[in-house]
Amino acid sequence: MMSLTGDGIFIGICVNISIALNINKERMNRMNQNVKDYVIEKVNELVNAPTCSPETKEAAKGWLAAVGTDKEAEETKALIAELEEDIMPIDTLIAFAGSEAGAKVFGEEKAKEVAAHGEEIKAGGAKYCDCPACAAVEAILAKKNEIL
């Protein structure tokens, strides 16, 4: 019969702590993999979005190529920096669509539609443009702290 005093208790506690840490590590790895899988999915959506800028597409492809390599951390930082630079705040979208430059890019009628849509989604609480690229970027940035 094992004594529950002295070294026996210490060893028992250490074994229990070790088991608990391993279980938590496994949970964290699964969670991290789930987050990574989600971000990979959103980055692929971004790459395929017709509204994605060439610079953002290049950063996204670079990150995808680096996943699972020793360059992943570096490429993650580069991707996040690019995404933060390129996501269009809703007020910027509305202002651009309502400008002469916006009318040249979208066409006069479409620019009015884009501005009205921007006002509508802003009233609903949107902070960013909801085009396919910006929607993917917003989803990725929501996981920023988990992937950096």
Image (cartoon, rainbow, N blue to C red):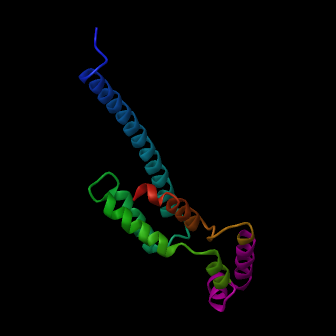
Of residues 13 and 69, the one drawn nearer to the viewer in this rendering: 13
Q: Is residue 107 magenta?
A: yes
The answer to whether 100 appears left or right of 146 in the picture is right
Mark yes or no: residue 62 visible: no
How far across and down, in percent of the image, does residue 89 sit?
60, 75
Of residues 37 and 35, the one drawn nearer to the viewer in this rendering: 35
Task: Examine the image and state in which quarter residue 133 appears.
Answer: bottom right
Q: Residue furthest front?
A: 5
How far across and down, in percent of the image, does residue 22 sit?
35, 34
Of residues 131 and 79, the one drawn nearer to the viewer in this rendering: 79
Check the picture and name the quadrant holding the N terminus: top left
The residue positioned 48% from the left and 63% from the top of the image is 47
Q: Is residue 124 magenta?
A: no
The answer to whether 110 appears left or right of 142 in the picture is right
Check the picture and name the quadrant holding the C terminus: bottom left
The answer to whether 90 appears left or right of 66 in the picture is right
The correct choice, above or below, for 132 with respect to 111 in the image is: above
| Secondary structure mainly formed by the magenta segment | helix
How far across and down, in percent of the image, does residue 3 sit?
28, 14
The correct choice, above or below, for 91 with respect to 50 in the image is: below
Q: Residue furthest left?
A: 7
The correct choice, above or below, for 111 with respect to 126 in the image is: below
How far across and down, in percent of the image, does residue 34 sit?
46, 45
Task: Examine the image and state in which quarter residue 6 appears.
Answer: top left
The residue positioned 57% from the left and 67% from the top of the image is 134
The residue positioned 38% from the left and 37% from the top of the image is 26
The residue positioned 66% from the left and 91% from the top of the image is 100
Q: Residue furthest top?
A: 1
Extent of the magenta region: 98-121
Mark yes or no: residue 118 visible: yes
